[in-house]
Amino acid sequence: MRSSSWQQKELAFLILYAVVFYAIVIRRSLQLSRDHYSKLYGLRPGWISHRFNDVSDAQWRNFRGNLPILTMVFGIFTVVACMFRALYCLKAKGMSIVWLLISMAYLSYLHGACVIFILAIASANFLLVKICGRTKYFSFVLWVFNLSFLLCNRIYEGYLFSSFGQSWAYLDNFRGTFRWHICFNFVALRMISFGYDYHWADQYNRFDQKERGVPNDRFSFPIYLCYLVYAPLYIAGPIISFNAFASQLETPQKNYSSRGVAWYGLRWLFSFFLMELMSHFFYYNAFSISGVWKQLSPMDIFIIGYGVLNFMWLKFFLIWRYFRFWSLINGIEAPENMPRCVNNCYNLESFWKNWHASFNKWLVRYVYIPLGGAQKKLLNVWVIFTFVAIWHDLEWKLLSWAWLTCLFFIPEMLVKSTANAFQVKGAFGRFVLRELRAVSGAVTITCLMVANLVGFVIGPSGINWLVSEFLHKEALPILGGMFVSFYVGTKLMFHISDAKQRRD
């Protein structure tokens, strides 16, 4: 009873602190945006309260600008696919042909003649899987093949047709509206997924219990190619395994009713409006790309870094859920990428499980477990995050972000393994453990902030500057205030977790 009363008082204090914290952050963010907007790049006239809109992020700007045409195109695709399925009672093979034709029309608009490169690499991968798929050296061959093309695609920027002979040079005038080698990153993940699912076809212990197995005839070239270029998930995912895709192509998903899918779409519209409000009033990303953050105080740098992280979360939330929504309408349920808010994660493991969640599941299934899983966890994280950085782009700042994240992972794993080795007894022991977990969470969030500042705001060259700014005498109170705020935030997450457990 006494413990429950204390927790209620603690929760009241934590909520009050959070309200004050966000009031300060919002007020200061508005002031920074108002005072420095004339120095920022990427602001455009907006539609809310005659304010400028922050469209400095190229990915968000392109997605937002193309939303009307994307929605119209996917609406037409959906009508055509559903009509053919209903009229001819099509199953996996039939629907793969329908979606393959639809998707190839889509890719032809996006990439023009460069579709030839995608089809050539995909065909070579299919032959490699069919020839070597049941051999003991298959994993090595599959990874060398796909990593080689990931790197070459970036290095040669999608290749020129003229490099294969002057008779092909005229095709360089028809390269479409979207660089094919950017989208190919997702295609490569699907090619690896197809390869491993074929390799493991007779090893049922390799698959999730909820996953429906697919017969060998589903590993055909039309279904494989349909999986690689399936229009609703082609540009940005979420990533789905070949087995899950092929089984739902045969029998559409039943986890979401028509009403559930409609509610999913309405929630997306509400989230889109939140993003519009955020980008009209808080110019976080414009600060990060304009270099104005160098002129700010440590407190303001923290606010900008925190804002950029939230902006990125909401941006990817909207992009991934938009494409997942269209996939759901067409009967294919892909994993949810953002099942939990970025402000409700207090350790690195839960953060990555709830950020690009479908990619995390892909990495666990096709990289982490084949490398030895938990038995070699300390080594595996270096391999995985290096691959993730290279997969995103060939940039030193991304490698710096990846290796910093790995460094921060090590103490978290050591603390977890140590905590699991001890059995806590008594109320006092549980209290001490909870406080230690809260402190650990605050340290982790701080490390996560630093890693993302380096990876997406200041770059590796700004590390020394960041350290010098935050460790001089005047900035130490700010650093302490940040740590206390993260500690309070972690304790608040504990209460949210406890409430969910009581409800379940």
Image (spheres, helix red, strand yellow):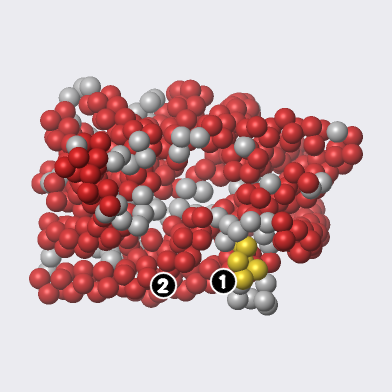
Q: Taking 67 as reference, is 386 above or below it?
A: above
Residue 433 placement: quadrant:
top right
Inter-mark Cα distance, 2 to 1: 15 Å
What residue sits 27% from the left and 30% below the top?
145
Pick the front one: 292 or 346: 292
- Report which residue position mark 2 lands on: 68
Q: Which residue is mark 1?
A: 273
Quarter of the image for the N terminus: give it: bottom right
* Residue 220 disc label: none
Point out the tag, 2 or 1, that comes first from the N-terminus. Answer: 2
User: Residue at 28% of width from left, 24% of height from top?
Assistant: 140
Instruction: Say whether residue 105 is visible.
Output: yes
Point out residue 46 in the picture as x, y percentages from the top left corner: 61, 72
Q: Is residue 222 left or right of residue 50?
A: left
Residue in view at x 42 percent, y 66 percent = 66
Specify the amino acid type for callout 1: Phe
Above or below for 321 versus 258? above
Which of these two is toward me, 200 or 499? 200
Q: Is residue 210 above or below residue 397?
A: below
Label 2 sits on a secondary structure element that is helix
Q: Position of residue 308 (x, y in %)?
A: 63, 52
* Residue kind at label 2, given as amino acid type: Pro
Q: Position of residue 19 (x, y in %)?
A: 77, 62
Q: Position of residue 225 (x, y in %)?
A: 19, 49
